Amino acid sequence: MNLQIESDAINKIDVSVYAKQQTLTDVHPTEQYSPPSLSLDADGNIQACNKSVEELFGYRQQELLLHHITCLFPKLTEVALMQGNRLNPLFNYICHCDYVFKAVNKQSAIIACNLNFLLVENNGKLNLRLIVRPVAEVRS
């Protein structure tokens, strides 16, 4: 009899988990999350951003276009993003070490983030792709 009760409890758990999965997929069945990312020119000016950037920082894309990346990451004024036709190797290394950068949103709140930069060539022009990964807890 005890075995039957455990079996019934397991079936109830499975059903509730399935129901929650159905609820989550019904909310946005075709929409997938994409990490916040920005397209920058070689000088660091914002050319485009996705919806996740708008949600994270509170700006609409039109408000960010053609502004320098330092409007979101003020400390980047101290760093050259590019050296010639390549990413600054020291800066790129720091980004790969999960260094925590401080970003500022539209309400002037600080957001801790990890950054990844990619160099993208488009029609002979070099552009940067910045992927922002918000950090839930700042590591000490």
Image (cartoon, helix red, strand yellow):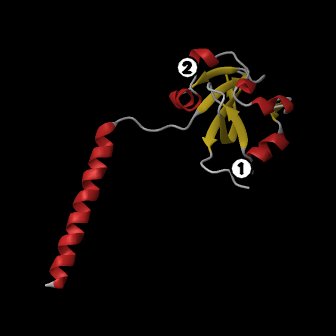
Q: Is residue 26 visible?
A: yes
- Would you place residue 110 above or below residue 20 in this image? above
x, y percent for residue 59: 58, 22
Residue drawn 61% across the image and 16% down it: 63
| Picture residue at 79% right of the left edge, 46% below the top | 94
Helix, strand or loop status at disc 2: loop
Residue 63 appears left or right of 71: left
Given the image, on which type of amino acid does mark 2 rest?
A: Arg
> Is the residue marked by circle 1 packed among few (<14), some (14-19), or many (20+) residues within 10 Å?
some
Residue at the (63%, 37%) spot, across then down: 131
Q: Which residue is drawn at the image coordinates 79% and 32% (left, top)? A: 76
Q: Quadrant of residue 130?
A: top right
Q: Nearer the viewer, mark 2 or mark 1?
A: 2
Which mark is drawn over residue 88? Answer: none
Label 1 belongs to which residue? Answer: 98
Measure the C-alpha gap from mark 2 to mark 1. 27 Å
- Helix, strand or loop under label 1: loop
- Alpha-carbon neighbours of circle 2 within 10 Å: few (<14), some, or many (≥20)? some
Q: Which residue is tagged 2?
A: 60
Farthest-out residue, left: 1
Type of the residue with mark 1: Asp
